[in-house]
Image (cartoon, rainbow, N blue to C red):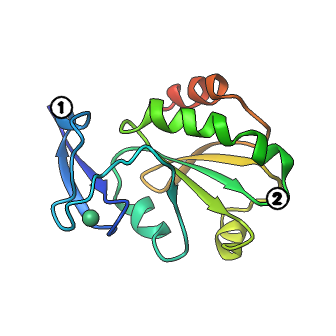
Amino acid sequence: MSLLHIVCQNCDGINRVQSETLKQDPRCNACKHLLFINSPLKLTTRNFNAHMANNDIPVLVFFWNSTCPLCKNMETAYALVTSNMEPWIRVAKINTEQEQSLAISNKISMSPTLILFKKGYEVSRKTEQMNAGDIMKWITAYI
Ligand SMILES: [Zn+2]
């Protein structure tokens, strides 16, 4: 039994969740929203640091932009990764056109880029189109 800090995808509040109850649709103590909604969390300069610093679960981030056809191709795969891998990781995405400072601070030079973070530190990165099985196999080696 272990206690995990999970950041709410709605209010960015920090929750303490027993690992055994992660699969039981835990809700935020502060705002009562579900901590996981089976949809990638949209990260921005406003909430990026809170989720990087305060989540005990790894955070997977898909850096994408609207002019990238490979990113578009990966949308279905990423949705599948979200439904399969949450709540064991937090699945997130960042639009690099809207969040240019995050693209720069994370040294994004290609699209698509996937980065797996643990406790705010990058542990692995991929810069290629991947299917859901490949993504899950890749991140499972780090969690
Ligand atoms: Zn909340």
**Crowd tier of the residue under label 2, counting other residues whose Cα lies within 10 Å: few below 14, some 14–19, many 20 or above:** few
Indicate left or right for 74 with 135 as reference.
right
Q: Residue at x 73, y 32 (%)?
A: 130
The residue type indicated by label 2 comes to: Ser
Q: Quadrant of residue 96?
A: bottom right
- Viewer-side residue, 94 vs 106: 94
Write down the residue under mark 2. Answer: 109
Are the residues at dot 2 and dot 1 in contact (C-beta closer than 8 Å)? no
Q: Quadrant of residue 137?
A: top right
Q: In this picture, is 129 found above or below 46?
A: above
The residue type indicated by label 1 comes to: Glu
Q: Quadrant of the C terminus?
A: top left
Q: Quadrant of the N terminus?
A: top left
Q: In this picture, is 98 found above or below 88?
A: below
Secondary structure state at the residue bearing disc 1: helix
Q: Is residue 143 visible?
A: no
Relative image position of residue 76 (x, y in whole percent)? 65, 37
Q: Residue at x 66, y 69 (%)?
A: 105
Write down the residue under mark 1. Answer: 20
